[in-house]
């Protein structure tokens, strides 16, 4: 087990190297010259050339890549072209709202979607099942920003139950923090809930056909014991897998959600950086997201062993 | 009063192309401590009968009618809660497939202890200690270690032993064993049968043994019910049934059992087979259910269903001709 974890952590190195090369190259081949952007409309070609040299943009591609990777390994993600602040500092300032949004969404989605899927499978073919499936289709097909604006309109503007937008740091108290995150989490989580509920239902339907479920009934267990212990634990592996895959959805959705609800997080930082062609910031944020995703996948693989004793590493 | 009385049991399933009469008016009883075998070909309704007793048939599409009296109480009128208190506690069940009947993600000890905690309110620790005892009882070595293992770490025979341990943990009054040895190797089959017989004496439970294996019947049963196409066609004490089968179907069934080594001693004859197939259970059959495959069938058989008649003391059969001609074509 320990050897496996070490092996998996080591295996993330080539993955991250490829991601790094990709991130670096993507911006290198993207149209638009950052030096020209910084120099502004009035600049002479000489000015642009000077700025380019000061940024190191005139050096060969591989040399620049090497220097960039070397800096990252030392914890230096570079300096923002626009604000002149270190990228790592900018990320640190923006990470709390995004992390909060992700965690609240994750908890909310799993605690709603899994019971929904379980009940739908148990009551297959009834109105409950159809309602859950109908909701899932809706969750898949309505974009995050529509859900976001509709929720904000009713819950914040019309009924005045929750704040319209913004973010309150956790340090200012649990409820003020949570209050601001409820609507964004529902908006961001709707696709995620739909995905998890569907997979839970499908997997549970299969598990409920198994012989050991009949055994559990013959032992005199009640319905919730059968569903949530005997069946759900067997259905866990596919469910955990989509929960993990869905984190990629959350990362993408966070960018839009943060814009709709004016949350000053990494998503907003990314959008702003792209609009300004702030290359070091874009590279830093994308690298961070990739790294998180790789770690999440590792965590999922390890979580399998908790639920299924037949899986050993 | 018998421990279990099954009276005119009907288990029907609604299917898209009509009603499937899997069990159609079957009656029998089981006395305390007795072993009753229910035999018949695949699809004759014996497993459905067993599942109906514990009401494990999903309703709908299933529908159970008649009466199933356990200690005088009609289980078909019991609430869900009352049924749960009986399942695994007073009546427990062993299934055919030991490989798939245990939950793969829970330890063996947990699965044995579960019924004890549920029905006898034992603490987790007490239930685990008892699970170790049960594993010892069913002859699994190193029970202390095995109790923490998962089903995939055990062989098929061991898993069936675990199933038996689960079934007997609460000292049930009735054990229903649905083809308990069918999926096992012959040598393991004998071990499991010995174990069941041994435990039956120790625990004193009555057994309903569902099987298509007449060798198993001869080995362990005291009384036998023969089922065909959802109906009971014959019932007799085990010796009477093997010595003097009355119903042509039972005779055919006994004739189709190969004798070990008969080809070596020179007395080998072609195995008798019963021609034809079990009739579809979706049509109502007016006459005798076996008439279409019976060599002795007459117009009377296809027109009028024979009633169960006592042909000898304790020996009933549903055949128009069985009494008159004695053993028809033995």
Image (cartoon, coloured by chain):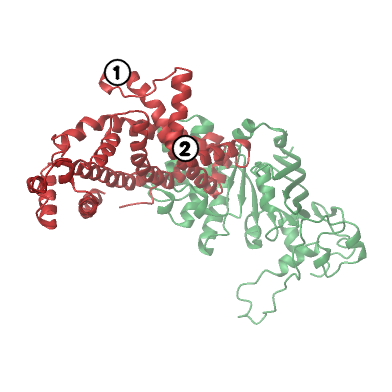
Chain colours: A red, B green
- Classify residue A11 as left or right of residue B187: left
* Quarter-of-image position of residue B324: bottom right
- Classify residue B237 as left or right of residue A214: right
Which-is-in-front pick, marks 2 and 1? 1
* Quarter-of-image position of residue A63: bottom left
List x then y, in percent, for residue A305.
35, 46
- Tell me the residue at 46%/24% (across/down): A153
The answer to whether tags 2 and 1 share a subunit is yes
The residue labelled by disc 1 is A173
Mark 2 neighbour density, 10 Å: few (under 14) some (14–19) many (20 or more): many
Q: What label sits on residue A114 in the rendered view?
A: 2
Say which of A37 and A312 sits in front: A37
From the viewer's perspective, is residue A195 above or below residue B117? below
Helix, strand or loop under label 1: loop
Which chain is disc 2 placed on? A
Q: First in sequence: mark 2 or mark 1?
A: 2
Mark 1 neighbour density, 10 Å: few (under 14) some (14–19) many (20 or more): few
- Tell me the residue at 24%/31% (across/down): A94
Residue A110 seen in render:
no
Say which of B111 and A125 sits in front: A125
Q: What label sits on residue A77 in the rendered view?
A: none
Residue A126 seen in render:
yes
Say which of B253 and B82 sits in front: B82
For marks 2 and 1, give the CA distance.
Answer: 29 Å
């Amino acid at each position: 087990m320990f050897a496996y974890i070490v092996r998996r952590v080591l295996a993330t190195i080539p993955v991250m190297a490829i991601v790094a090369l990709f991130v670096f190259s993507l911006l290198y081949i993207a149209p638009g010259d950052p030096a020209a952007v910084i120099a502004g409309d009035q600049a002479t070609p000489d000015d642009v050339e000077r700025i380019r040299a000061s940024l190191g943009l005139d050096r060969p591609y591989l040399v620049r890549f090497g220097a960039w990777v070397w800096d990252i390994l030392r914890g230096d993600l570079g300096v923002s072209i626009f604000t002149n602040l270190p990228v790592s500092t900018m990320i640190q300032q923006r990470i709390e709202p995004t992390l909060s949004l992700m965690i609240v969404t994750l908890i909310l989605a799993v605690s709603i979607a899994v019971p929904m899927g379980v009940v739908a499978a148990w009551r297959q073919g009834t109105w409950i099942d159809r309602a859950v499936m109908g909701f899932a289709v809706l969750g898949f097909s309505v974009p995050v920003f529509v859900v976001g604006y509709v929720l904000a309109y009713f819950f914040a503007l019309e009924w005045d139950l929750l704040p319209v937008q913004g973010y309150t740091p956790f340090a200012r108290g649990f409820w003020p923090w949570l209050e601001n995150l409820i609507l964004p989490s529902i908006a961001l989580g709707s696709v995620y809930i739909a995905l998890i509920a569907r997979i839970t239902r499908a997997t549970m339907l299969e598990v409920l056909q198994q012989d050991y479920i009949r055994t559990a009934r013959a032992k005199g267990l009640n319905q919730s014991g059968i569903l949530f212990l005997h069946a759900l634990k067997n259905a866990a592996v596919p469910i955990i897998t989509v929960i993990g895959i869905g984190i990629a959805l959350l990362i993408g959705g966070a960018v839009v959600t943060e814009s709709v609800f004016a949350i000053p997080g990494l998503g907003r930082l990314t959008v702003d950086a792209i609009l300004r062609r702030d290359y070091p910031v874009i590279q830093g944020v994308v690298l961070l997201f990739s790294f998180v995703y790789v770690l999440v996948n590792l965590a999922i693989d390890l979580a399998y062993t908790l639920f299924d004793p037949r899986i050993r590493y | 009063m018998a421990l279990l009385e099954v009276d005119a049991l009907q288990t029907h399933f609604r299917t898209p192309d009509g009603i499937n009469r899997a069990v159609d008016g079957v009656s029998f009883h089981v006395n305390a401590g007795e072993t009753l075998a229910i035999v018949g070909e695949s699809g004759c309704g014996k497993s459905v009968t067993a599942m109906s007793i514990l009401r494990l048939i999903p309703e709908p599409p299933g529908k159970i009618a008649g009466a199933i009296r356990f200690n005088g109480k009609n289980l078909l009128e019991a609430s869900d809660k009352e049924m749960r208190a009986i399942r695994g506690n007073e009546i427990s069940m062993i299934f055919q497939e030991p490989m798939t009947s245990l939950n793969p993600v829970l330890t063996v000890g947990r699965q044995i202890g579960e019924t004890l905690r549920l029905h006898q309110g034992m603490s987790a620790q007490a239930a685990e200690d008892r699970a170790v005892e049960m594993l010892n009882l069913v002859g699994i070595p190193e029970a202390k270690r095995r109790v923490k293992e998962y089903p995939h770490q055990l062989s098929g025979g061991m898993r069936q032993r675990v199933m038996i341990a689960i079934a007997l943990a609460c000292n049930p009054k009735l054990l229903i064993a649905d083809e308990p040895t069918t999926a096992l190797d012959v040598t393991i089959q004998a071990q499991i049968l010995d174990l069941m017989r041994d435990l039956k004496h120790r625990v004193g439970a009555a057994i309903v043994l569902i099987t298509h294996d007449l060798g198993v019947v001869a080995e362990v049963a005291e009384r036998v019910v023969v089922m065909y196409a959802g109906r009971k066609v014959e019932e007799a004490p085990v010796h009477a049934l093997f010595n003097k089968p009355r119903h042509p179907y039972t005779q055919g069934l006994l004739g189709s059992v190969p004798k070990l080594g008969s080809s070596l001693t020179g007395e080998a004859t072609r195995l008798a087979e019963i021609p034809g197939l079990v009739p579809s259970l979706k049509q109502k059959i007016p006459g005798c259910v076996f008439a279409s495959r019976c060599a002795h069938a007459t117009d009377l058989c296809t027109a009028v269903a024979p009633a169960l008649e006592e042909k000898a003391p304790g020996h009933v059969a549903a055949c128009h001709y069985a009494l008159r001609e004695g053993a028809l074509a033995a």
